[in-house]
Amino acid sequence: MKIVHSCGYDSIPSDLGVHVLHQKVQADDAGELTDTTLVASLSGGVSGGTIDTLRTQIDVSRMDAALRRLAASPYSLSPDRTKEPDLGRQSDVALVDGTDIAPETTGWKAPFVMGSYNTRIVRRSNALQNWAYGRTFKYREVMSVGDSPLSRVYAAGVAAILGGLVLGLSVPPTRYVLDRILPAPGEGPSDKTTQRLLRDGHLHHHHDRRPVHLPGDGTGRSRIPGHRGPAGGVGPEPGARPRPAPRRGRCPHPGHRTR
């Protein structure tokens, strides 16, 4: 049996999206990718497997300072971190003013819950392709919370919740409570919720101040060629017979190679 990781919502839309964006920039003869941002807009829930992954990472890294430094590195999944460029701090938890991403992207953006993982997958893909995206390629993922005057407050609230979850799982008294109320491995959002998980996603790249967009269609389906299913996983062809629901403990996504 083989376990194929990063083959569903984490991290196919990010990985293939940046790859297709790179192809578009190359076709436009616009050079290499530089500052690139995925703005996600989602609704739904979180799976018990994702929670358990976070819980395990906290437990393992708490006992080893070297592992904590590795997890904090933006190139932690790179095949050779010594060859990666030093592009300064690349935070996955910062609040971002939308106008810093693109002039028409209004409202403040919150940290994206899977950004710290997806960004490393994308950077790894760049390294595996001999830095085809560019040696100055910087990538981040953020989440839209609307464009109202209160968007900065909402974004800060999301950041506080995410930070509180990590802190709560790190401290024994709150860990005891959270372990009993959070989804267990094998539990999570319903199929209906998963179908609408990613409502929209926009990739923004700036080259000579010209943004290039690779938008989703707002229906839970991406516009990535070959990715016809819902963004929560690689779906079947339209009209195909649905697969039976997976048994508890089995990965719900089929094996899918992105490289």
Image (cartoon, rainbow, N blue to C red):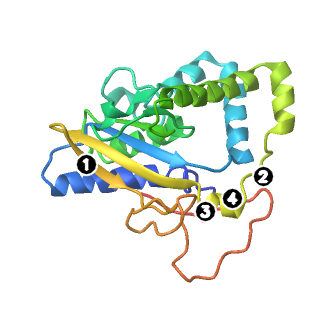
Query: Can you say whether 213 is above or below 1 in the image?
Result: above
Residue marked by disc 2: 187
Front disc: 1 or 2? 1
Say what secondary structure mark 2 lies in.
loop
- Asked whether the residues under the numbered discs 3 and 1 touch, taking CB atoms below 8 Å apart as contact, a structural biologist would say no
Q: Which mark is residue 251?
A: 4
Q: CA distance from mark 4 to mark 2?
A: 11 Å
Residue 207 lies, in percent from the top left, at 18, 40
Marked residue nearer the N-terminal end (4 or 2): 2
Residue situated in front as seen by the camera: 224 or 209:
209
Front disc: 4 or 2? 2
Say what secondary structure mark 4 lies in.
loop
Amino acid type at mark 2: Glu
- Asked whether the residues under the numbered discs 4 and 3 touch, taking CB atoms below 8 Å apart as contact, a structural biologist would say no
Q: CA distance from mark 3 to mark 1?
A: 27 Å
Density class for disc 3 (Cα within 10 Å; few <14, some 14-19, many ≥20) is many
Residue marked by disc 3: 195
Amino acid type at mark 4: Cys
Residue situated in front as seen by the camera: 98 or 48:
98
Residue 81 lies, in percent from the top left, at 40, 30
Q: CA distance from mark 4 to mark 3?
A: 17 Å
Front disc: 3 or 2? 3
Marked residue nearer the N-terminal end (3 or 1): 3
- Asked whether the residues under the numbered discs 1 and 2 touch, taking CB atoms below 8 Å apart as contact, a structural biologist would say no
Residue 187 seen from this side: yes
Q: CA distance from mark 3 to mark 2?
A: 16 Å
Say what secondary structure mark 3 lies in.
helix
Amino acid type at mark 1: Val
Residue marked by disc 1: 212
